[in-house]
Amino acid sequence: MNSNIGDAPIFPDLFNQTPPDEEIISVTADGAYDTRKCHDAIVARNAHAGISPRKNVQLLKPDTPGAMA
């Protein structure tokens, strides 16, 4: 395993391994997961993201479903 890769970049692929018929209501995570790809993956499953903002927070442009949520 490459230790240079953080959790957030691989979250969408791991999250999408959950069977589509299994309902996910919410995802709670720390600021490391406050990325566009993580939010998009969560919203694609109709779930709520309870993710703390990163310390250097910048608002996402509302051009993807995850950013709008």
Image: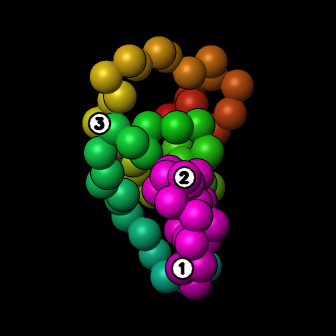
Disc ID at residue 4: 2
Q: For the point 62% across and 22% down, which residue is it?
A: 62
- Disc 1 + disc 2, Cβ < 8 Å: no
Q: Amino acid at mark 2?
A: Asn
The residues colored magenta run: 1-19
Q: For the point 56% across and 54% down, which residue is it?
A: 5
Q: For the point 57% across and 72% down, which residue is it?
A: 1
Q: Quadrant of residue 56?
A: top left
Q: Is residue 57 left or right of residue 45?
A: left
Question: Label 3: few (<14), some or many (≥20) within 10 Å?
Answer: some
**Tag 2 or tag 3, which sits nearer the N-term?**
2
Depth check, front residue: 33 or 69: 33
Residue 11 is situated, as x and y percent measured from the top left of the image, at 53, 60
Q: Amino acid at mark 3?
A: Ser
- Residue of label 3: 52
Q: Is residue 57 visible?
A: yes
Disc ID at residue 18: 1
Badge 2 marks a residue whose secondary structure is loop
Q: For the residues marked 1 and 2, what is the alpha-carbon distance in whole angstroms?
A: 25 Å
**Tag 1 or tag 3, which sits nearer the N-term?**
1
Answer whether residue 16 is magenta in the image. Answer: yes
Q: Is residue 46 visible?
A: no
Badge 1 marks a residue whose secondary structure is loop
Judged by depth in the image, the label closer to the viewer, 1 or 2, is: 2
